[in-house]
């Protein structure tokens, strides 16, 4: 069952949601410290993170999957959000510079189709940040948060998936080492959990945060081709003599 936009909004309004936004957002800012003069697209439920990155962007829009639902964003001013089919984005080819993908890849039925559609709308050399649950982390094992729904990934799985869709992962980061428990002790010590977990490279981070670049070209895969056999009929037609001798024989005949 797909995540509902009401549940997502309620989670990010909660104290644990504030911890997730602050922790993951800090990693995003480290990967993309400057988005000036960039056209930024948030896909999935990226609105909690878009204000962190798109403050000086040329344009910021938020697309939310039809199965999830949509909310008005931003709340003041003109709306910049829309309900879309993620694999059929209503954008021209190469029309955005950066894409932030949150709460989307693990929910879609066809992750490769989604990434290929993102590759289509990205400009050459455009960049993508993907946030996906780590299958070894505690957040993927508990369905009390949005990161516990859908399909979690291992590092090798997400890397292979992105390369097939013409993306080259440039930077890897992990976040949400703190247990997803709504206890004040854990939430107050969230930054300490992140420092210890990141410093020791512990394997149980809640999410992967990947910064990838769109490749300019794709190597064509070598495919084994079948040899086509030309079948010859058993009974072949035989040619009939025309009664005319070859030119060489004609030249050797005596004149009559």
Image (tube, rainbow, N blue to C red):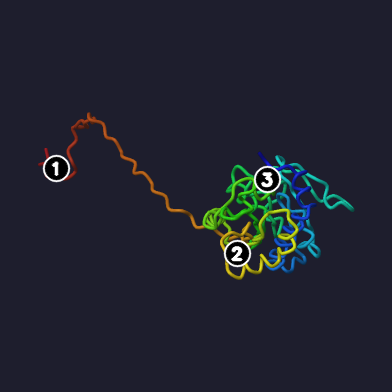
Q: Quadrant of the C terminus?
A: top left
Residue 172: mark in rendering: 2
Q: Residue at x 19, y 35 (%)?
A: 244
Q: Which residue bears the numbered disc 3? A: 86
Q: Earlier in the sequence, mark 3 or mark 1?
A: 3
- Say if mark 3 contacts mark 1, CB within 8 Å: no
Q: How many marks?
A: 3
Spatial distance from mark 2 to mark 1, Cα to Cα? 84 Å
Q: Residue 235 or 114: which is nearer the viewer?
A: 114
Spatial distance from mark 2 to mark 3, Cα to Cα? 24 Å
Q: Residue 198 or 114: which is nearer the viewer?
A: 198
- Horizontal placement of 213 versus 49: left or right? left
Q: Position of residue 193 (x, y in %)?
A: 66, 65
- Say if mark 2 contacts mark 1, CB within 8 Å: no
Q: Earlier in the sequence, mark 2 or mark 1?
A: 2
Query: Where 128 falls versus 245 (above or below)?
Result: below
Label 1 secondary element: helix
Query: Where 173 falls versus 136 (above or below)?
Result: below
- Dividing the picture into quadrants, the one containing residue 127 is bottom right
Q: Residue 149 or 177: which is nearer the viewer?
A: 177
Label 2 secondary element: strand
Q: Position of residue 56 (x, y in %)?
A: 80, 65
- Say if mark 2 contacts mark 3, CB within 8 Å: no
Q: Residue at x 36, y 44 (%)?
A: 226
Residue 249: mark in rendering: 1
Q: Position of residue 51 (x, y in %)?
A: 79, 60
């Amino acid at each position: 069952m797909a995540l509902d936009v009401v549940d997502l909004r309620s989670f990010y309004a909660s104290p644990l949601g504030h911890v997730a936004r602050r922790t993951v957002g800090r990693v995003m800012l480290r990967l993309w410290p400057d988005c000036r003069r960039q056209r930024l697209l948030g896909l999935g439920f990226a609105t909690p993170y878009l204000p962190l990155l798109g403050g000086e962007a040329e344009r910021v829009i938020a697309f939310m999957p039809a199965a999830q639902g949509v909310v008005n964003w931003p709340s003041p001013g003109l709306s910049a959000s829309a309900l879309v089919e993620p694999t059929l984005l209503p954008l021209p080819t190469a029309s955005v510079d950066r894409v932030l993908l949150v709460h989307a890849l693990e929910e879609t039925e066809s992750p490769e189709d989604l990434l290929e559609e993102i590759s289509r709308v990205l400009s050459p050399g455009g960049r993508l940040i993907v946030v996906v649950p780590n299958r070894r982390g505690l957040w993927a094992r508990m369905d009390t948060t949005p990161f516990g729904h859908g399909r979690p990934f291992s590092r090798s799985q997400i890397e292979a998936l992105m390369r097939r869709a013409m993306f080259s992962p440039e930077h890897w980061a992990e976040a949400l080492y703190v247990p997803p428990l709504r206890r004040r002790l854990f939430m107050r010590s969230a930054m300490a959990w992140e420092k210890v977990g990141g410093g020791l490279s512990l394997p149980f981070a809640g999410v992967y945060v990947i910064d990838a670049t769109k490749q300019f070209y794709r190597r064509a895969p070598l495919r084994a081709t079948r040899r086509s056999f030309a079948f010859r009929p058993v009974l072949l037609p035989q040619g009939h003599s025309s009664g005319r001798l070859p030119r060489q024989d004609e030249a050797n005949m005596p004149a009559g």
